[in-house]
Amino acid sequence: MTEEKISKPVIGVDIGGTKIMAAIFSPGGRIIAKDVRPTLSGEGVNRVIGRIGTAIDGVLSGQNMAAADIGAICIACAGGIDTGRGVVVTPSPHLPGWMEIPLADMIREKFGVKTMIINDASAAALGEHSHGAGQGVNNLVLLTLGTGIGGGIIIEGKLYLGAVGGAGELGHMTVEASGPRCGCGNTGCLEMFASGSAIEREAVLRLERGEKSSLAEVVEGDLHKITAEIIGRTARSGDKLAQDIMARAAYYLGVGLVNITNIFNPEMIIIGGGMADLGELIIGQGRKMAAELPFSINARAVRVVLAQLGNEAGIYGAAAFALDDLRGK
């Protein structure tokens, strides 16, 4: 089926820790309209699902459209996703309590439209492939660096989901066998060393040990206010402790990039998520390691770049997934 034979637009939804974003996309993949509202995940699963429905209603009503005018809905959601069943199997820190939630069926029943769900990082990878930094690249891997670390994999131009939709949990590769226990149950995960929460935790630990840094002054002594962005800014200003913390995270990210390069032999590794705003401070060393340490044939092939779509990568990817499904891909 060709793209021109798709007569109806689709809706892409991205459920984040702070906001729900829904957008109508044309059959050609162009955003027609967008609705953004707070997630408020602390209010519970049912309230959030209600807001997802309200966001979809909002974007439809804004265009004087009905659900019957839509070809499909795809939702990008954090956590362990069984794409085949349309179920959020395991929760993420952003969505506590989301365990065995049949989200696709719930939205399908409300709107009467075919509905799919995919992991949010997989959606971001597909979004960057279709409309962002990975356009024209057949084999790529995306890492999202934020509170945690997620991943998405494109192989021969198609999103790789694995047996049940769980592929791409690259933040949970082991990079230090004797490292701290991760929330996933493993020890020494990449997420425990190179995520935003990891560097914040390291900063607080070292300050509580009495190490000197201007970080304490920046947050006026309230260590709970320390963020990855503040650590990065303080590192750029010359603070030794902040620089050490960033260098440690960048090194472990580099270990992860070397592993990814050797396992997948991608043409491109894209770094997205909130920590991507730190730029070369977080990815510079990893780029160097990925160019020098993998098998030479793999190292020569790969480029490490920053994502381009920002917080819209998920909705672009969700829409691309829905459109591909309608095309029978």
Image (cartoon, helix red, strand yellow):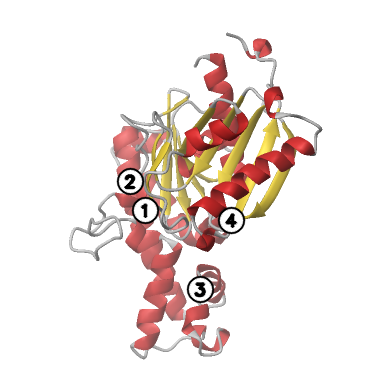
Mark 4 or 3: in front is 4
- Point out the frontmost of discs 3 and 2: 3
Do labels 2 and 1 touch, CB within 8 Å?
yes
Amino acid carrying mark 2 in the image: Val
Q: CA distance from mark 1 to mark 4?
A: 33 Å
Disc 1 vs disc 4: Cβ atoms closer than 8 Å?
no
Q: Position of residue 167 (x, y in %)?
A: 35, 37
Check the image and name the residue furthest to the left. Answer: 178
Amino acid type for the residue under numbered disc 1: Gly
Q: Which mark is residue 254?
A: 1
Is label 1 or label 4 in front? 4
Closer to viewer: mark 3 or mark 1? 3
Which quadrant does the N terminus fall into?
A: top right
Q: Nearer the viewer, residue 155 or 234?
A: 155
Of residues 328 and 113, the one nearer the viewer is: 113
Contact (Cβ within 8 Å) of mark 2 with mark 4: no
Query: Which element is circle 3 on?
Result: helix
Q: Which residue is mark 4?
A: 39
Please give the name of the residue rendered at 40% of the width and 33% of the height, measured from the top-left corner.
266
Instruction: Work out whether residue 13 can be spotted.
Output: yes
- Left or right of residue 316, residue 119 in this image: left
Please, what is the three-letter code of the amino acid marked with disc 3? Ile
Q: Which residue is mark 3?
A: 231
Q: Nearer the viewer, mark 2 or mark 4?
A: 4
Answer with the quarter of the image where residue 69 lies: top right
In the figure, 245 relative to 281: above or below? below
Residue appearing at x 34%, y 34% in the figure: 264
